[in-house]
Amino acid sequence: MWFLCVFYHRLLDFRKPEVEALAELFGEEIAENESLQWRLPVHHHNDTPFHFVQLSSEEIARNIAKRSILVKGMYELWGEGTCYEELKDSILSYSDSRKLQFLTSDSTFRISVETFGKGLTFDEQKDRIQSLTYIPFEGRVNLKNPDHNFFLMEMIESEENNGLQPILQRRIFFGREVGFADRKLLPTFQLKSRTYLGPTAMDAEMAFLMANQAKATSGKLVYDPFVGTGSILVSAAQFGAMTMGADIDIRVVRDGRGPDCNVWSNFKQYGLPMPVALLRMDNNLPPWRSGLKEIFDAIICDPPYGVRAGGRKSGGRKILRGTVDPYTVPDDKRTDHIPSTGAYSLVECVHDLLHLAARMLVMKGRLVFFFPVLRDETGGEVKFPEHPCFKLVAVSEQILSSRYSRFLLTMVKVEPYSEEIKEAARLMHLEFRENHLKWLEDGNIHSSVFKPIDSSQIHTDPKAFKDPKPKYRGKYV
């Protein structure tokens, strides 16, 4: 059955992957190496908020809309057209057996008007609703809590269209609402009201998107190896998952900013179940006992790639360089000891993350993480890390500045972990390391993202000449 899926106009590259992940979560059967069937309305392009998606039941469509962050609503389309005469013909030709069951005298209904590209006055909306008198509504109008919601949606012809490419003709849709988004979720979890925050805390909207991509739900165990202040785990816990996290900074996971301002406080603030455990752990030297594997249903994280915070691993600079030997902490100093750490390059960090996921994820478990890209360094071609245990099922790009973006990668474990797999992954890592660029190995992303413009431009550009302050490209980072 085809449904009209209306998206919020943001994070355009993340919309379809989220819906497809949720469709699988709620029982939609999707053949291997295939995805959901999508199609566009006439005269629309890929960035339009209106898409048609084929789903097997209304229940799945309703559940997707209720849980999704980027879906505004799912609708059973009764008619569409480029003008109201075409819309009328389309609605009248729609199956009466589908329409009449929602138009009975013992039901209540409401009709709402929405537009994209231009606003309408109250009188204009009223006129559009009154033009639908040919639909045999027999029930009573109830604006607060109706049995059935109907929507008249119009894509206005405009040269701007909120930043979208112009469409050739306007399109009008009329349909019954099947499911709608939980509009209270993001305001409730917004970071500005969060008890405990750090400089790298994941935005609530993105954290919920990542949890949806990982199919976090009740009965699943979700792990974040770079937990920080716990933003990602908060989102997974909101969807019912059990959570577990780790971080190399013991001050973050143990102390926070006091007994009433720490990672645990964030879960307490929203009345969520506490994490199973928060560990002080180095992902480069994991403490998992021999033979332990396949315990996590999903791993969701934002690895430290050096823009706002760099990666660290145990050992300290002198130890890692071999100038001093590793030390043993005396028993009387263990309570307050903060282990020394050294630089941890992104290449090494991602390799360790893939190795952890290959070993600790269950079969069909999901690994969801961000991977940074400097456009000036890639030459237009982006090469993502690979692992023989995983299949890359979704890639979504978030552009943060003119030369820097990050990709949300969603991988599914399709092969069991073994020593042969471990060796094959090591060879793939070496190839990735050799073929990639030096900035990734050195972890020097911060200086590349915030690189000042050439000094020659300051003298040739009149505006730059008037203001001698350094100009930075990474405006939104």
Image (cartoon, rainbow, N blue to C red):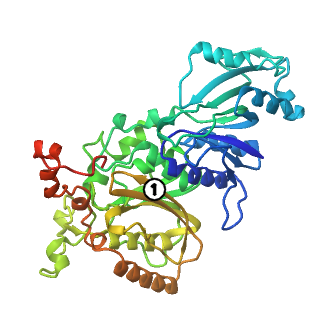
For this view, does 40 lie left or right of residue 202?
A: right
Residue 301 visible at all: no
Q: Callout 1, which amino acid?
A: Glu
At a point 19% along the width and 67% down the height, the residue shown is: 340
- What is the x, y in percent for residue 298? 52, 60
**Residue 249's x, y, as percent?**
27, 58
* Residue 42 higher or lower than 120, as above or below: below
Q: Quadrant of residue 178?
A: top right
Q: Helix, strand or loop at disc 1?
A: strand
* Residue located at (75% from left, 30% from top): 87
Residue 462 lies in what quarter of the image? top left
Would residue 226 appear left or right of 474 to someone viewing this image?
A: right
Question: Which residue is disc 1 drawn over?
Answer: 397
The answer to whether residue 192 is left or right of residue 382 is: left
- Residue 463 or 113: which is nearer the viewer? 463
Estimate the x, y position of residue 368 in percent, counting from the top left. 48, 60
* Residue found 29% across the figure and 73% down from its top: 441
Q: Residue furthest right?
A: 97
Q: Dot 1, how many residues are within 10 Å of its Cα: few (below 14), some (14-19), or many (20+)?
A: some
- Closer to us: 358 or 57: 57
Between 295 and 167, the residue placed more toward the observer is: 167
Residue 141: image location, x then y, percent: 73, 15
